[in-house]
Image: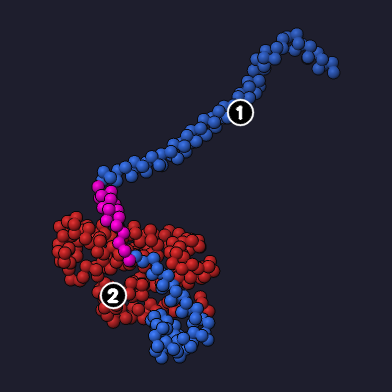
Amino acid sequence: MDCKTFEEQILDGLDLNKDTSGAKALEEHLASCSSCKAFQQVVYSGLESMGSGRRSVNDPELFQSIQNKRLSSGSGIASRPNQVAKIVRISAPVAMAAASVLLGIWLGGRILTYTAQPNEETVSVNTAPELYALEIHMNDESSEFIENYLSGN
Amino acid sequence: MTEADLIKGLIAKDEGAWKTLVDQYQILVYNVCYGFLQNSHDAQDLTQDIFIEVFNNAHKFRGDSKLSTWLYRISSNRSLNFIRNNKKWRFWKELSSFFVDDERGESQESEEPMDSDEKYELQERSRLLYDAISRLPENQRIAFTLHKIEDLPYTEIAEVMNVTLPAVESLMHRAKVNLRKTLTPVLK
C-alpha cells in the first residue's frame, strides 16, 4: 500500500488501538514514514483539539441572556438608547474637527490681515509722498537741506 | 413534554416551551457552532441568536424531520453565514492563534500539564487542520464537521443537509481528497 491509501485510512479515522490487520499495517507504515506520521498527528490531534472546547453541561444563564438579547433587539424603544449612545460617541470628534476648522479659518484670516498691512503702507508711500514726509516729521526746511546736500555732492 | 407539544408551544410563543427548548438543545447548538467557529465567545453569541431565530420562526418548522435535525441545519448554516459575513473575524482569529495562552490551550493545560513546546505543537496541528477544513467548499465542510466533530452518522447528515445518503458519501470522499491535497504539501 502507498502513502495515499494510508492517508485515506487516517482521515477515515482508523483506530490504531484495534487489533485489525489494517491497523497493524498502518502502525508499521507510520513507524517508517515521517510524512504520514506528521499527517496522522495533524489529523488525530487536530480533531481532538477542535473538539476540546465542546460543552457537556448546560449554561444556566443562557436562557436569561437570550431573553435579554431578544427584548433589547426586538423593541424600538430599547434600540433608541443605542442610537443616542452612537450620536454621543461620534459628536465629540465631530465637534473637535469643526472647532479645528473654525480656528484655522480665524488664524488664517488674522495672518493674512497682518501680512497685508505693510503692503498698504508701501502703496500709500508711493502714491502720496507728502503724507509719508509728514509721517517721518520732515518739513520744507529739511527737504530743502537734503536737496542742497544731494546737489552739492 | 413530547416533541410535538414542544413545537406547538413554540408556535404559540409559549415561554415555558421556549425555556424547555433552550434547556434541551443548548449543548447541541453550542457545540455545532463551536465546531465551525472554534471560538467560545462567538459560539455563545451565535447560540443566542439561533435560539432567537428559532423562537421567531418556529411556525416555519414543517415537522417532517426531528427538531434536532432542524437545529443542526440552522446551526450549521448560521455558523457558515457568520464566517462569511465576518471577514474581519477570520483575520482576528488568525491573529489570536499567535498568542500562546488561548482558551483552548488553557483548558487543556488544566487537564494535564504540558510544556510550552508540546502546547505549541498541538496548537499548530490544530491550526493546520482547521485552515484546511476552512478551505473546503461549504457543503463538504458541513458534512466533514458534522461527521468528524459532531459524530453524526451519514444518514443524519443527509437529513440535515437535505440530500441523499450517496450524496453525503460523495461529499465526504471529496472532502477527504481535498484535505489530503491541502495538508500533504504542507507536511512534506
Residue A31 in the image: state x and y as whole percent. 51, 85
Q: Is residue B51 above or below residue B152?
A: above
Q: Colour of chain A?
A: blue
The amino acid type, in three-letter code, at marker 1 is Thr
| The furthest residue to the right | A153
Taking the image as drawn, is residue A70 in sight? no
Q: Is residue B168 above or below residue B7?
A: below
The amino acid type, in three-letter code, at marker 2 is Ile
Residue located 22% across and 58% down the image:
B19
**Residue tagged by mark 2?**
B157
Residue located 26% across and 46% down the image:
A76
Residue A30 in the image: state x and y as whole percent. 49, 84
| The furthest residue to the top | A141
Task: Indicate yes or no whether the magenta region holds residue A66.
Answer: yes
Q: Is residue B1 above or below residue A19?
A: above
| Chain coloured red | B
Which disc number belongs to residue B39? none
Residue located 17% across and 67% down the image:
B3
**Residue tagged by mark 1?**
A115
Marked residue chain, label 1: A
Secondary structure at numbered mark 1: helix
Quadrant of res B87 = bottom left
Secondary structure at numbered mark 2: helix
Residue B140 in the image: state x and y as whole percent. 35, 74
Q: Is residue B72 above or below residue A96?
A: below
Query: Along the horizontal axis of the image, is A117 left or right of A60?
Result: right
Residue B177 in the image: state x and y as whole percent. 41, 80
Q: Which of the two residues, B78 or A7, is positioned nearer the viewer here?
A: A7
Categorize mark 1 by other alpha carbons within 10 Å: few (<14), some (14-19), many (20+). few
Magenta-tinted stretch? A56-75
Query: Along the horizontal axis of the image, is B173 left or right of A98?
Result: left
